[in-house]
Amino acid sequence: MPNHDSLSRSSVQDLLCKLISIPSVNPTVAPEEPYGEKTIAEFAHSWLQAHSVTARLEEAAPGRPNVYAEVGSGNGPTLCLCAHLDTVGTSGMTISPFEPRVAGNKVYGRGSYDMKGGVAAIMSAAAVIAADSNIRGKLILALVVDEEYASIGADDFVKKHKADACILVEPSEQKIILGHKGFVWAEITTKGRAAHGSRWDIGVSAIGKMSRIIVAFEEFDRRVLRKRVHPLVGPASMHCALIQGGSGISTYAPECTLKVERRTIPGEKPEDAVRELEEVIRSAGEEVDVNCSFHRPSLLCDRDEPVVRHLRAAAQSVTGVQPEEAGVAFWMDAAVFAEAGIPTVNYGSSGAGAHEAVEWVDLDSVVSVAQVMVETTRRFCK
Ligand SMILES: [Zn+2]
């Protein structure tokens, strides 16, 4: 592996610490915290320009820019590397969130692991490719906003750009992640008959009706969904997440609304998941509609896709070992790229404490991921 200035441990550390020191908390997830997605995007933009990488800001929503960057002439395949710029909030943290601390091989701070380590890795990789590689194809970077809430950044990016493959660099302990689950958010409303609390003869409680549905959902989750297991991502599941109902202690509840989340495995379609929930409700003796308010697909990437083959070989040549291949239960922006027709896989650094009180990333793994991305780009964009 040749040595490059942009890939030295100290330059990657320096970039990572700068990224951590710019707060970029997602404004929807923690609206009370200072807003910074734009500041970090502007920093990444000028850093890339200063390292001979063509870059520009693209607003996914007013004041919320993605960074698009590219290297190479594009006379061959295009590879996209993607990382998100936003983080979750800092409430409850027991370390200083925006003053990065380096202790041995660990770099502490909000977003160090999820996923400014990944941002630093792919920015460094792009700088190396710009400095000394004659790739025939093109490397593009997607540094996106809003992954921690509704992925408006990734949605906007795939509307504007095409690629032959994409690698996300969400933290994965340097495993190749070939699949993840999707999800469906659904809402159910039962109607009762409002009446004075003494009028058992005419009152009907919408909450009582909902209780039968909840029991049926719990049964369905345990007996059916948990047995529907995908080898990469594990079982399907659902849970009752939010409930609201009733108008007063002395009134039969006229209405009750329940919000459920259903986690789907590769092969399950959102419309089928909704239909199934309606059947469960009918089996409980109730008749109400299930309204899907939001859904995201699952991810499944074929392990023989060229991007996976090149990534596997690159990781093997950089680290000396064959990377493990796995799936994860949580959702990622990867599915947004896959849904746009771009074969997508994930490979990222090691660490701990995503969304937790103490968060750190393993610096060696960030450097290693950067090297693997350089090597994969050379092979894929040849
Ligand atoms: Zn993340």
Image (cartoon, helix red, strand yellow):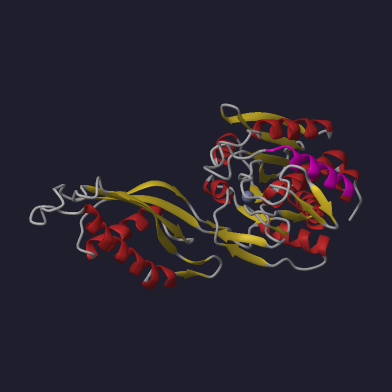
Above or below 87: residue 224: below
Single out the residue that lies furthest toward the top.
62
Given residues 163 and 45, the one toward you in this image is 45
Query: Picture coordinates of residue 154 (x, y %)?
Result: 58, 41
Given residues 72 and 293, the one toward you in this image is 293
Above or below 126: residue 104: below
**Quick check: is 13 in the magenta stretch?**
yes
In percent of the image, x 82 and y 66: which residue is there? 320
Total numbered labels placed on residues in the image: 0
Query: Picture coordinates of residue 253 (x, y %)?
Result: 22, 50
Confirm whether residue 137 shows in the render: no
Above or below 57: residue 162: below
In percent of the image, x 14 and y 48: which residue is there? 196
Query: Picture coordinates of residue 182 (x, y %)?
Result: 49, 55
- From the viewer's perspective, is 116 left or right of 252? right
**Quick check: is 11 in the magenta stretch?**
yes
**Quadrant of the drawing holding the N terminus:** bottom right
Query: Picture coordinates of residue 27 (x, y %)?
Result: 57, 36
In percent of the image, x 56 and y 50: which residue is there? 338
Q: Quadrant of residue 278?
A: bottom left
User: Magenta segment, which residues?
Assistant: 10-23
Magenta stretch mostly in which secondary structure?
A: helix
Confirm whether residue 109 shows in the render: yes
